[in-house]
């Protein structure tokens, strides 16, 4: 007897032969449509120099570290007076 069954999962391309039966997968062609990104055109953005002065008011945060020397401590970076 010959039976036809729908296939829900991919099978190997070759026939499978056992003592009781021979299974032959039937193939068909189907069109596969896909989209892919290809370069079409280029956008060029040119820059030109502009000088502008503005007065800006803002609160600035500042961090300060207090170091306590205990014992024999060798401090590498002594504070400089030229910093704000």
Image (cartoon, helix red, strand yellow):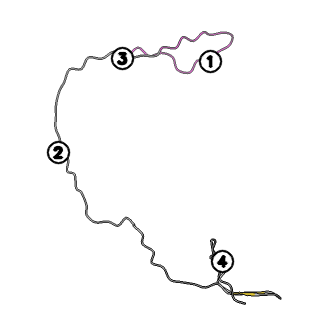
- Please give the residue where the numbered disc 2 appears in the rendered image: 48
Which mark sits nearer the N-terminus, 1 or 4? Answer: 4
Residue appearing at x 48%, y 14% in the figure: 64
Packing grade of label 3 (10 A; few <14, some 14-19, many >=20) is few
Which mark sits nearer the N-terminus, 1 or 2? Answer: 2
Task: Identify which residue, 26 or 14, lies in the foreground.
Answer: 26
Real-space CA distance between mark 1 and mark 2, rounded to the nearest whole angstrom: 52 Å
Real-space CA distance between mark 1 and mark 4, rounded to the nearest whole angstrom: 75 Å
Corner quadrant of residue 83: top left
**Horizontal side, residue 66 vs residue 11: left or right:** left
Q: What quarter of the picture does the C terminus occupy?
A: top left
Real-space CA distance between mark 4 and mark 2, rounded to the nearest whole angstrom: 63 Å
Spot occupied by residue 27 in the image (x, y as percentages of width and height): 57, 84
**Is 82 drawn above or below residue 49 in the view shown?**
above
Corner quadrant of residue 10: bottom right
Nearer to us: label 1 or label 4:
4
- Please give the residue where the numbered disc 4 appears in the rendered image: 11
- Please give the residue where the numbered disc 3 appears in the rendered image: 60
Real-space CA distance between mark 3 and mark 2, rounded to the nearest whole angstrom: 31 Å
Spot occupied by residue 32 in the image (x, y as percentages of width and height): 45, 74
Residue lying furthest front: 1
Residue appearing at x 69%, y 89% in the figure: 2
Spot occupied by residue 37 in the image (x, y as percentages of width and height): 37, 64
**Horizontal side, residue 30 vs residue 20: left or right:** left
């Amino acid at each position: 007897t010959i039976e036809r069954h729908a296939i829900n999962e991919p099978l190997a391309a070759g026939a499978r032969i056992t003592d009781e039966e021979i299974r032959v997968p039937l193939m068909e062609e189907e069109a596969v449509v896909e989209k892919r990104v290809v370069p079409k055109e280029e956008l060029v953005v040119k820059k030109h120099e502009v000088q502008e002065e503005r007065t800006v008011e803002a609160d600035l945060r500042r961090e300060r570290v207090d170091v306590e020397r205990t014992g024999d401590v060798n401090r590498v970076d002594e504070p400089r007076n030229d910093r704000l």
